[in-house]
Image: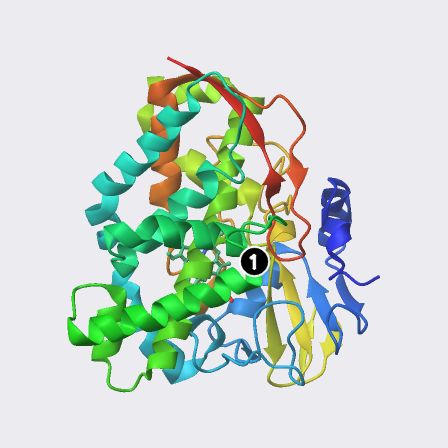
Amino acid sequence: MDLGDADLYLSAERYQRWREHTEADAVLWSGPGTSPGGFWSVFSHEHCRSLFAHSAPFTSEYGMMIGFDADHPDRSGGRMLVVSDGARHARLRKLIGPFLSRMRAVSMEDAVRREIRTHVEALCDGEVHDVATGLAPRIPAAVVCEVLDIPVGERDRLIELTNHAFGGADETFDKMTPSQAHTEILYYFNDLIARRRRRPGQDLISGMLRDQGLSASDVVINCDNVLIGGNETTRHAIAGCFEILGERPELLTLLRERPEAVHPLIEEVLRWTSPAMHVLRVATEQVTIGGQEIAKGSAVVAWLAAANRDERVFPEADVFRPDRQPNKHLGFGYGPHVCLGAALARLEIRLLLEALAELTDAVVVPTPPVALRSNLVQGRRSLRVTVTPR
Ligand code: HEM
């Protein structure tokens, strides 16, 4: 079976499959298909973590998702943070990290709260709203605009382009396909970089430009990393909050009565939704995982969403437990590449849950959500909700 086949992830049957593979500590081979050279898959929490350890003999430089391997490398390898290793990776991480840090999240809190409240208030009109295409993508896009300090008058355009480029929608926007919208964003970054060269600020682009070792295209590539990393994942955790609240209405009361309950709840949202379904590495030497020999140069996929339902680490893994502690989910990955935007993602989810608890009485999901067709991003293509204001 080609585990890269996106159709396998359209139905809830995937959880049953993942459970079987996880319990068996399976290490499975998918022949050439969605990935030209084929790839190994690991599922258990322990196996997935073993791929990410600092000393693990694996590289990200060929790419970090199904489709890339040693013979078909990602062209950004060694230049984009998430697909670079060693000293180059450490340098980029040190450069980009402060712009996405916990401190940065604190400084953005008021602006993000305002943005989220405006969107939640707009939902409170008794109408049906598709949050998967409406509210959910706009919040992370607004946060990335803050990080890059996009001029206010240009934000709506960039947010719409981002929504179209990564929204999973088929419709055309401004006569553009999603990939044309993505190209348009890269042109926009190029133009913004020229402006920041002339007038530097305190934002991520100006920070990267101060590093003499980075070319303009390196800066574009890493803006794109932050844009994709920040949008493609967080939007699905945000939409997931609505789905969870639709199924578990008592959580809104819990948040009102015990506001501190939001912290374990955020972690359970991240485990439960697991928007980054997998990450990929390539073995730099022969290695054995779970008794299976893996040759140097082979691609290995860690199914994070499966590991996040590993019963040995998460008792009653198929139950959403708002107070689950400890909660060592791998939603943000682990090891040297662990998500650099985690503090911002947690901020967005917290402020959304707080706004919903304060402003709404109930979230109803009137029709079944529509799954996104993807082997990489776990989420919804459509999630229609009605919200009752308080
Ligand atoms: C890395 C997931 C939000 C920026 C990662 C990785 C995962 C992940 C699994 C590791 C990739 C690997 O090991 O190859 C998520 C999830 C998010 C989220 C589930 C939301 C729920 C964000 C946000 C930003 C961001 C909001 C920025 C605004 C990044 C960056 C990296 C990264 C720059 C690369 C780090 C490195 O390679 O050192 N993310 N992410 N992410 N993420 Fe996130």
> Which residue is outermost to the right?
1
Q: Position of residue 335 (x, y in %)?
A: 45, 66
Residue 368, quarter of the rendered image:
top right
Taking depth in this image into account, of 338 and 114 the one nearest to the observer is 114
Q: Nearer the viewer, residue 165 or 132?
A: 165
Residue 6, given in percent of the width and then of the height, sits at: 73, 55
Residue 246: percent from left, percent from top: 55, 23
Percent coordinates x, y for residue 190 in the rendering = 35, 73
Pointer 1: what residue? 178
Q: What's the amino acid at mark 1?
A: Pro
Towards the viewer: 116 or 83: 116
Residue 277, placed above or below residue 58: above
Residue 231 visible from this viewpoint: yes
Q: Relative to 369, is 147 on the left or the right?
A: left
Placement of 299 over or under 99, stated as above or below: below
Q: In what quadrant does ligand 1 lie?
A: bottom left
| Visible residue check, residue 321 | no
Look at 28% across and 36% down and name the residue there: 113
